[in-house]
Image (cartoon, coloured by chain):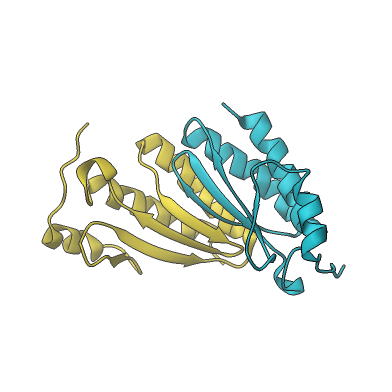
Chain colours: A cyan, B yellow
């Protein structure tokens, strides 16, 4: 399924349903830094997110050091943000809430 | 257990037992980019490495996008490289060989 790139206003509207995510200047990706109590919680979050990502066939760019996970989402094929990014972002929010401190 | 920082020559000697790892200019960290067939293999590798890391109580800095995992290891408390970094690097090599393409 080919996803359509969201215009900035559409992306901004979607962003209001999320907490702590930032749209980049080009309007082409969203990012968030997740903080956990320790590595086990951080990697537990990553594992949950990885399962969702694989199911969606839509994968994050992410960096982890100990209790911190920096996530960036965009849809390479669409050259920007699509519904898939917001779907994954919402799933990550849920995973973080479950696995949280 | 307080680990002692390895001198550059000691780090270089350890490095000869590994494949594809690079020592940074300051001699304070080692890095490697691992490539896999897809996300499942990349994250499978990360999961194996995460279990070892937690057991060693020594954690990587790593970045993942799809099939690629960039790893940097150092020992923050020692301000450079210690035996722990090479222990984790070797475990990662094993995990990558198991889960590899």
Quick one: which residue is furthest to the top in this view? Answer: A101
Quick one: which residue is furthest to the right in this view? Answer: A1
The foreground one among B83 and B63 is B63
Number of on-image labels: 0
Q: Is residue B62 left or right of residue A45?
A: left
Q: Which residue shows up at 72% across the image and 68% down it?
A: A80
The foreground one among B74 and B88 is B74
Residue A96 location, quadrant? top right
When the figure is inspected, residue B48 is found, relative to residue A72, above or below; the finding is above
Q: Which residue shows up at 69% across the image and 66% down it?
A: A28
Q: Position of residue B32 (x, y in %)?
A: 39, 64
Would residue A88 be seen by someone viewing this image from the given angle?
A: yes
The foreground one among B92 and A7 is A7
Would residue A82 be seen by someone viewing this image from the given angle?
A: no
Residue A47 location, quadrant? top right
The foreground one among A64 and B45 is A64
Q: Which residue shows up at 57% across the image and 58% down it?
A: B42
Q: Is residue A6 left or right of residue B40?
A: right
Q: Which residue shows up at 35% across the image and 37% down it?
A: B56
Residue A19 location, quadrant? top right
Q: Is residue B24 left or right of residue B38?
A: left
Quadrant (top left/top right/bottom left/bottom right) for the C terminus of chain A = top right
Q: Position of residue B89 (x, y in %)?
A: 35, 54
Q: Position of residue A18 (x, y in %)?
A: 73, 43
Quadrant (top left/top right/bottom left/bottom right) for the N terminus of chain A = bottom right
């Amino acid at each position: 399924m080919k996803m359509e790139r969201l215009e900035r206003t559409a992306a901004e509207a979607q962003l209001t349903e999320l907490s702590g995510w930032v749209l980049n200047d080009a309007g082409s990706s969203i990012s968030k830094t997740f903080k956990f109590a320790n590595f086990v919680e951080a990697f537990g979050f990553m594992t949950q997110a990885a399962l969702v990502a694989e199911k969606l066939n839509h994968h994050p760019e992410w960096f982890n050091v100990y209790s911190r996970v920096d996530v960036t989402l965009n849809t390479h094929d669409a050259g920007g943000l699509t519904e898939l990014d917001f779907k994954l972002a919402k799933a990550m929010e849920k995973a973080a809430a479950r696995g949280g401190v």
